[in-house]
Amino acid sequence: MIFITANDVIGAGCSLYHVNRTIKETGAYFNDGSHIIYVNGSYKDDSDPVGELMHDFRCLNSVDMFYPILAKQVKYFKETEGGQEIMCQIFEDLAEKRITEEKKAFARRLIARGKQTLEEIAEDTDLPLEEVKELAGLQLA
């Protein structure tokens, strides 16, 4: 598993941190195949491949990037009509999903208070009644 973090979460100034599981009592490596890498997103060293990649992640313009494949994709998504349409759709979908999740969270709070009917909650949250019933734990026929 790889985590690219905005900052140096370990705090040692390294570009990468490799985390492997060990058996506490013996100190022996536990070879279960799990391996975690933390990538320091704030790492800056343009002479290092990880530093170059983190530089590219922070770039606003594709012409300033080191990695041509990444630059090509950034240019497509930022500077072409087709790429911009795709990105707009992705952000619209994410916004819609977040709004729906917020409506569901609000409906759950209203259900927990028990002061409104499920029909009223559906109306107040703009969720379908069937979904409100599902959130309330009622079996649909």
Image (tube, helix red, strand yellow):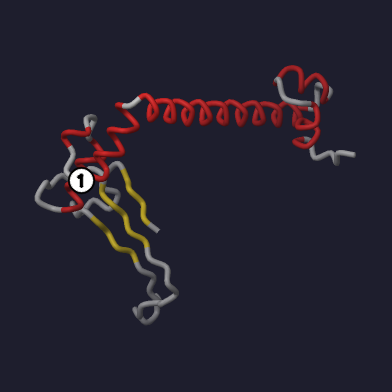
132 sits to left or right of 82: right
- In the displayed structure, would residue 91 be above or below residue 134? above
Left or right: where does residue 20 sit relative to residue 90? left
Residue located 22% across and 40% down the image: 56
Quarter of the image that includes the N terminus: bottom left
Q: Which residue is mark 1?
A: 67
Residue at left offset 19%, top offset 41%: 55
Residue 101, percent from left and from top:
61, 31
Horizontal side, residue 118 vs residue 81: left or right? right
Which image quarter: residue 114?
top right
Q: Look at 83% across and 22% down and name the residue there.
A: 119
Q: Which of the 4 quarters of the picture holds residue 57? A: top left
Quarter of the image where the C terminus is located: top right
Look at label 1 and name its amino acid.
Tyr
Residue placed furthest toward the right: 141
Image quadrant assignment for residue 124: top right
Q: Residue at x 47, y 31 (%)?
A: 90
